[in-house]
Amino acid sequence: MPFTRRTLLSLVGAAALAQPALADDSNPNSPYAQRSIGSPTAKVTAYEYFSLTCTHCAYFGTAVMPQVKPKLVDTGILQIIYKDCPLDQVALMAAQVARALPADFYYPFIESLFASQDDWAFAPANGDSKAALFKYAALAGMDQDSFNAAVNNQQLRQFVLNSRAEAMGLHHIDATPTFIINGTNYPGALEYDDFYALIMKNGG
């Protein structure tokens, strides 16, 4: 889904773009640590910049990943490293909640959000996206206090926003999803055969 610098500024304000990224990878369950699936020694590493409210990202997550994961990830061919690129405030909130979960819960949670995107992102009960999102966080084992702490964590919010600023400023990404493989951007929710060919072309 396309986005612009204007939409970024509507999320963060110009001053926030200059702030350095925050990182803490000493604890794999830290919300600032890498979130990924697949072996770190996989033949190919793909960085996926995505938004949890992007319909194209949801398509890739629900229609293509069920083939990608068993055929490419679980076989040691591909590692996917997830990079936040929220399109709006709801996606920003969801990204914070996803990162606040233990690392092993991250992938199942974002896949569940993609599968239920219409329910929590676009047409939640009573128009309350936060309450709708908590319903899915609770299913992942998060209690209300932990959920509120994640949503109100300003350091985590800035970390996610910095990831989006990095996408636009450093990698010149203007749509989600975009995959970066061997330094090249590949935008769009590719069908499995096209994605498979892309991985093979890059060393798979």
Image: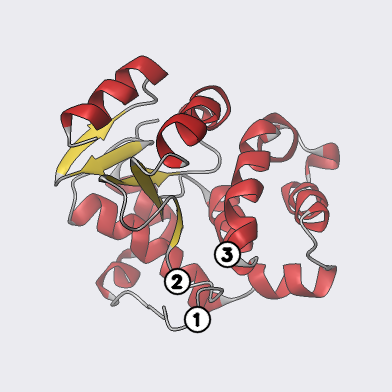
Q: Is residue 180 visible?
A: yes
The residue singled out by tag 3 in the image is: 103
Q: Is residue 13 above or below residue 45?
A: below
Looking at this view, is 15 or 68 the one in front? Answer: 68
Q: Secondary structure at mark 2?
A: loop
Q: Earlier in the sequence, mark 1 or mark 2?
A: 1
- 1 and 2 marks in contact (CB < 8 Å): yes
- Answer above or below: position of 196 versus 185: above
Q: Is residue 57 visible?
A: no
Which residue appears at 55% of the width and 49% of the height? 91
Q: Earlier in the sequence, mark 2 or mark 3?
A: 2
User: Quick check: marks 2 and 3 in contact, CB under 8 Å?
Assistant: yes
Residue 183, given in percent of the width and then of the height, sits at 14, 47
Amino acid marked by disc 3: Ala
Q: Earlier in the sequence, mark 3 or mark 1?
A: 1
Q: Secondary structure at mark 1?
A: loop
Q: What is the quadrant of the N terminus in the image?
A: top left
The image's colour scheme reads secondary structure
Q: Quadrant of residue 105?
A: bottom right
Question: Pointers 3 and 1 in contact (CB under 8 A)?
Answer: no
Residue for point 43% across, 83% down: 26
Residue 27's tag is: 1
Residue placed most toward the observer, 54 or 83: 83
The amino acid type of the residue labelled 2 equals Ala
Q: Residue at point 24% right, 43% down?
A: 180
Disc 2 designates what residue? 33
Which quadrant, please, contains the C terminus? top left
Side of 23 relative to 181 (left or right): right
Query: Could you classify mark 1 by the number of other residues whose Cα lies within 10 Å: few (under 14), some (14-19), or many (20 or more)?
Result: few
Q: Amino acid at mark 1?
A: Asn
* Residue 36 location (% of width, % of height): 45, 55
Marks 1 and 2, how far apart in space?
A: 7 Å
